[in-house]
Image: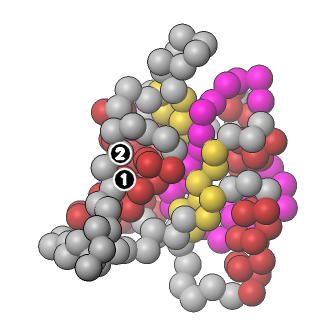
Amino acid sequence: MTAAGRPPRVVVGITGATGAVYALKLLERLRATGRETHLVVTPAGVLNAHHELGLDRQALEAKASVAYNPADIGAAIASGSFAIDAMVVAPCSMKSLAAIAHGLSDNLLTRAADVALKERKRLVLMVRETPFNLAHLRNMTAATEMGAIVFPPLPAFYHRPQSIDELVDDSVERVLALLGVEAAAPKPWHGL
């Protein structure tokens, strides 16, 4: 519980970049740790989740405590008066990164990210694109300068993962640790 007597709130955004599995695992882990999750999925995010995971909007939204239409710019998460503890965009497309980096607030996801930044809340962007062009790099720099954490979900191999699930889980646990989730369990490097 927070000092305000409510469970910690985390906004989770899903965009159309590849890697919808990261959002699904995050939502499951956040729920397991007692977090209240507020989900906003862009139309491209729904398409990608359907392609990669076979999930539709309704199935994605069922994983969250509260779900919002990305066009509902008047939703609770669009205001700094609605207290959140953190936000994660997983995956974060280059389009959404650009909108966040330049304060465009052109849909509820990018508005919620703008609110997280202005309220000085933790904002983690799991950017997905390869290779990066100069615009991508500049947008990542701008977002970082504003206080966001740019976290491309790059796999670690030192713990010798045996499956894609292990790679995904490790990235998700690292994000949970960044959010301050006590139950986060990223695999540490112990040295040689």
Determine whether, in the image, residue 81 is placed left or right of residue 69: right
Figure quadrant of residue 172: bottom left
- Whether residue 71 sits left or right of residue 166 in the image: it is right
Tag 1: amino acid: Glu
Q: In the displayed structure, would residue 82 be above or below residue 68?
A: above
Q: How many C-alpha atoms fall within 10 Å of the one at disc 1: few (<14), some, or many (≥20)?
A: many
* Type of amino acid under label 2: Ala
Residue 169 seen from this side:
yes
Which residue lies under the disc numbered 1?
A: 173
**Which residue lies at the image location 35% right of the left edge and 45% below the top edge?**
184
Residue 51 position, x and y percent, is: 38, 65
Any part of residue 115 in sight? no
- At horizontal 63% and vertical 85% (from top left) the residue drawn is 132
Mark 2–mark 1 Cα distance, whole angstroms, equals: 5 Å
Q: Residue furthest left?
A: 162
- Spot occupied by residue 189 in the image (x, y as percentages of width and height): 32, 68
Q: Is residue 51 above or below residue 54?
A: below
Q: Is residue 97 magenta?
A: yes
Quadrant in the rendering for residue 84: top right
- Is 63 positioned to the left or the right of 144 in the image? left
Q: Determine contact: label 2, label 1, CB under 8 Å.
A: yes
Decide whether residue 175 is among the magenta residues.
no
User: Residue 26: x and y, percent?
Assistant: 40, 47
If the image is split into quadrants, where does the C terminus sit? bottom left
Q: Magenta residues?
A: 80-108
Which tag, 2 or 1, sits closer to the chain's start? 1
Residue in the image at 28% along x and 68% along y:
190
Tell me, what colour scheme is on the image? Answer: secondary structure
Give whichever of 158, 41 is nearer the camera: 158
> Residue at the location (31% across, 49% down)?
185
Vertical comparison of 8 with 157: above or below? above
Q: Mark 2 sits on what residue? A: 184
